């Protein structure tokens, strides 16, 4: 038996509870993993509460991220005892996930735990931090260098945003952080490396198709009007890496920034990223993340607290990263 969160469909609603589950119920897979740490991302919170259609089949163990140890393997790359990390691949959505003491998975989904991290710090990064890294790499590939000017991060006190601020500042960019909680968390964002802290409201109203050119690049985890306004205020040839929808799925924008300023909108998908790109992102994270600064942006909870924490995350009551000690 092992402990896990289990999301079940009751009528039209989702009910998630902590349960003791028989190992025989684990899904197929060629590697069995003892989960040491998981984490709570926005998507996990949607899966746990049922507030968004993340879970594709019920019952489901939520949890898109894990760091743990291989227990059994029929996969040629993995031996018992190997330290591994998993992000995405539909785990916690279509395949039983990581908010559990055990998981059985496809060995092709796993990567080796980078030497720079232990299981806990890897989960302090989690999908949120790995997505922030993919977004920063996307900006670099489009030629957004620190000498091009200020870069913007939206949803800045969130998981993706906090790590994006840290990484960009570490790389020498001048970072402007957009938050709905500047009064509460301005100091937090400056500690992570933000040079400027801006109010979310400045980006959430309907704006003009083109505004004053200000940003060389941006990492946007909010979407909606915010993303439209970011596009409208990017400098000529600037790039936004769009990775999230915390403020909405829609994109009420015009083509003006794209056809008149050559602005680029790059979409970031972390879930089905090929293995070599995952390994590249994790290697860069190992080089760039200041583990003690990351720790200052991280809180820890147990499996039994993850259900309440999920509600808090969606209600905007948490900041930074939340690791889950599943044991
Ligand atoms: P968090 O909840 O930790 O952060 C989201 C942040 O967005 C909040 O902290 C808040 O920051 C801001 N925000 C929340 N609601 C609104 C709103 N209504 N309008 C404007 N801003 C808002 O989530 P994560 O960082 O884990 O994820 C962020 C987004 O990125 C999510 O949409 C998630 O699904 C997506 N994502 C996508 C991935 C991909 O593969 N593309 C991978 C990982 C995440 P503040 O209070 O500072 O304004």
Image: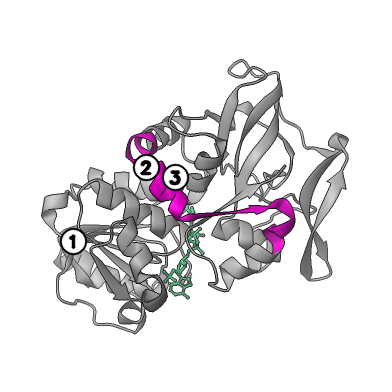
| Residue 163 rendering spot, x and y as whole percentages | 39, 52
Q: In the image, which disc is placed on residue 130? A: 3
| Residue 26 rendering spot, x and y as whole percentages | 80, 37
CA gap, disc 1 and disc 3: 22 Å
Residue shown at 35%/36% (left/top)?
Answer: 284
Q: Is residue 174 above or below residue 138?
A: below
Segment tinted magenta in the rendering: 284-307
Residue 3 magenta: no
Q: Is mark 3 within 8 Å of ligand 1?
A: yes
Horizontal side, residue 152 vs residue 25: left or right: left
Q: Element at badge 1?
A: loop
Looking at the rendered image, the quarter that the N terminus falls into is top right
Q: Nearer the viewer, residue 114 or 225?
A: 114
The numbered mark, 2 or 3, whose residue comes first in the sequence reads: 3
The numbered mark, 1 or 3, whose residue comes first in the sequence reads: 3
Q: Element at badge 2?
A: loop
CA gap, disc 2 and disc 3: 11 Å
| Residue 127 rendering spot, x and y as whole percentages | 50, 47
Q: In the image, which disc is placed on residue 56? A: none
Q: Element at badge 3?
A: helix
Kindly indicate the quadrant of the structure image that contains residue 88.
top right
Residue occupying the far left of the picture: 147
Q: Are marks 1 and 3 in contact (CB under 8 Å)?
A: no
Residue shown at 63%/63% (left/top)?
Answer: 46
Residue shown at 65%/19% (left/top)?
Answer: 75
Horizontal side, residue 309 vs residue 277: left or right: right
Scheme of colours in the image: one colour
The numbered mark, 1 or 2, whose residue comes first in the sequence reads: 1
Q: Which residue is mark 2?
A: 289
Horizontal side, residue 299 vs residue 145: left or right: right
Looking at the rendered image, the quarter that the C terminus falls into is top right
Q: In the image, which disc is placed on residue 150? A: 1
């Amino acid at each position: 038996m092992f402990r896990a969160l289990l999301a079940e469909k009751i009528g039209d609603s989702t009910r998630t509870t902590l349960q003791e589950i028989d190992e025989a119920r684990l899904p197929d897979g060629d590697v069995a993993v003892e989960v040491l740490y998981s984490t709570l991302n926005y998507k996990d919170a949607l899966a746990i509460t049922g507030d968004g259609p993340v879970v594709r089949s019920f019952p489901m163990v939520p949890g898109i991220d894990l760091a743990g140890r291989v227990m059994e393997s029929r996969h040629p790359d993995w031996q018992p005892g190997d330290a591994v990390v998993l992000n995405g691949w539909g785990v916690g959505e279509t395949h039983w996930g990581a908010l559990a003491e055990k998981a059985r998975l496809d060995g092709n989904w796993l990567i080796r735990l980078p030497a720079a991290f232990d299981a806990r710090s890897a989960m302090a990064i989690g999908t949120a931090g790995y997505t922030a890294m993919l977004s920063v790499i996307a900006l670099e590939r489009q030629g957004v260098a620190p000498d091009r000017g200020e870069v913007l991060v939206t949803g800045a006190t969130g998981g993706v945003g906090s790590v994006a601020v840290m990484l960009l500042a570490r790389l020498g960019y001048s970072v402007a952080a957009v938050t709905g909680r500047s009064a509460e968390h301005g100091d937090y964002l400056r500690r992570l490396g933000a040079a400027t802290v801006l109010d979310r409201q400045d980006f959430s109203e309907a704006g003009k198709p083109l505004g004053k050119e200000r940003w060389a690049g941006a990492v946007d985890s909010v979407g909606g009007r915010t993303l439209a306004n970011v596009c409208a205020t990017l400098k000529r040839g600037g790039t936004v890496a769009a990775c999230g929808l915390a403020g909405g799925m829609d994109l009420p924008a015009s083509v003006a920034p794209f056809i008149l300023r050559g602005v680029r909108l790059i979409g970031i998908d972390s879930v089905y990223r090929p293995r070599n790109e995952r390994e590249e992102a994790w290697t860069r994270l190992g080089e760039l993340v200041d583990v003690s600064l990351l720790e200052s942006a991280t809180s820890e909870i147990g499996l039994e607290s993850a259900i309440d924490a999920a509600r808090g995350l969606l209600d905007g009551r948490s900041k930074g990263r939340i690791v889950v000690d599943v044991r």
